[in-house]
Image: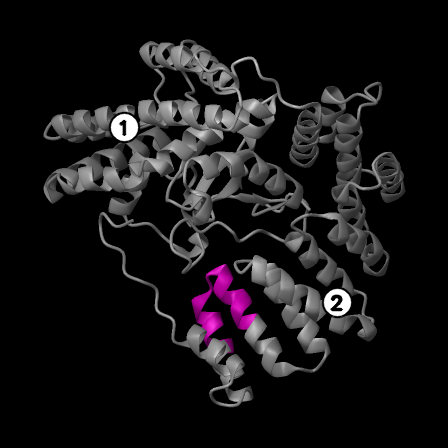
Amino acid sequence: MLEATTRLRGAMPSNRSDMSAPALPISRRRRRPAARFVALLSAGALVGASLPAQAQKGPPIIRDAEIEQLLKEYTQPILRVAGLSQQNIQVVIINDRSFNAFVADGRRIFVNGGALLDAERPNEIIGVLAHESGHIAGGHLARLREQLASASTQSILAMILGVGALVAGSRTGNSGLSQGGMAAMTAPNSAIQNTLFAYLRAQEEQADRAGVKFLTATGQSPKGMYDTFKRLADQMLYQTAYLNPYLQTHPLPKERVAALEGLAKASPYWSTKDSPALQARHDLMRAKLFGFLERPDAVARRFPPSDRSLPARYARAISAMRFAESRVALAQVDALINAQPQNPYFHELKGQMLLEGGKPAEAIAPLQEAVHLAPNPALIQIMLGQALVASNDRSHLDEAVSILQAAVIHEPESSDGYSQLAMAYGQKNDLAHADLASAQAAFTRGDLKTAREIANRAKMRFPIGSPGWVKADDIASYKPPQRSLLNH
């Protein structure tokens, strides 16, 4: 199930986009200028001049069980040798076609869909993930905050105003405003800027060394990492009107690329290739993204009917599901299932197709098979719960509640899971738990006002002191934490 805040499949939007403590989704966080400046330095591609205003409500996040599972398998060996396996670090996919990856806290690695599409080999994206893991292992964000803390408040504010003027100038085409912003940044703060940017460059070099070290320790080649950074560095020579955001936050001078080449080629695993099985899954992942993100004509050009490979058929089936007749798409998905009956994500796609086609009862069986086969099926369980509830068969309600309860344990930030659970409880006439689940759905969406109102109503339905009452009271009494200038 591929879903995103941009409603790529016309169904449930994702809400796993918060970027700090598990308090509120980022969709409700409006960054103050100071906080936005800190984000610009530590993860400039996420919040800054290149993004539209709505991005401040949270980047468009793609959720998909298949892609997330593959990226989890890519990162697990690296995180283990980096000493990070106990931190439950997740890879979050941003619906953006540019090549970018970054860390903004110690719990998540953000990677653009464009980076996944550009990486032709697993080793290329694994290398980027190893580099970003180096930032987390090195504690670079915490150290950056220390560097910022050493600057005077007046200097930081002057730089913030300068960044703001540059952003406004670039958006409005006002060159005078941009020049004023540059002057504000460069006049009293050039020494601070030089220090900070030099510090960032040093961090990038440290992350390069750490990434190569992690890849070598796991018996993987650093060639993909080097090839990717070399390609980006070469592109930098020819890009003038547009500069890739990865190059903005990960400067790639020739000296750094040369140093990385020396480190990478010294690895005993330089010539190690990705396994054919892993390459096949990587190709399916890229085809899936392309099928969901591109128009039919683009899919047809990249995967013409003459291409009978499984990834090509996967992309065409997804495109047919989105734009063609349902019977055509269903025949293509059935052919995929016949080719790989143990692939859970082909069954998931069939269930998604039937559910979105207004046939929830028929979607139940393929989604049940997908849940049975998938290693981490929580997202598929939410879709299965939706199908069970939408079937309007009361005999399915107990199963729906059980499945959705299990799903939200693993996906506690999924408003969709709680919303479907609320509907299941409502159909069972269990109004107390229906209200509680509705309040949890509103809370995970960041709608605190609605969450408090429904939670207070739920409290009136539960016995005082019962587990349900306590959960509702937690939501009703919740207050967002205050954030300081440098504790972002």
Which residue is nearer to you in this view: 379 or 138?
138
Task: Give the dominant element type of the magenta stretch: helix, strand or loop.
Answer: helix
Q: Is residue 126 left or right of residue 243?
A: right
Q: Which residue is mark 1?
A: 200
Q: Nearer the viewer, residue 225 or 430?
A: 225
**Residue 232 visible (yes or no):** yes
For label 1, the crowd category at 10 Å Cα-Cα, with few meaning under 14, some 14 to 19 and many 20 or more, is many
Residue stretch rendered in magenta on the structure: 438-454
Quadrant in which residue 177 is drawn: top left
Q: Residue at x 52, y 66 (%)?
A: 442
Tell me the residue at 51%/33% (across/down): 112
Q: Amino acid at mark 1?
A: Leu
* In the rendered image, the vertical position of residue 373 relative to residue 130, given as above or below: below
Q: Is residue 270 above or below residue 277?
A: above
Query: Looking at the image, can residue 50 be seen?
Result: no
**What amino acid is found at the position of numbered circle 2 in the picture?**
Val
Q: Earlier in the sequence, mark 1 or mark 2?
A: 1
Badge 2 crowding class, 10 Å Cα cut-off, few under 14, some 14 to 19, many 20 or more, is many
What is the x, y in percent for residue 483? 27, 56
Q: Residue under label 2, please give it.
A: 389
Q: Residue at x 25, y 37 (%)?
A: 144
Disc 1 secondary structure class:
helix
* Magenta stretch holds residue 358: no
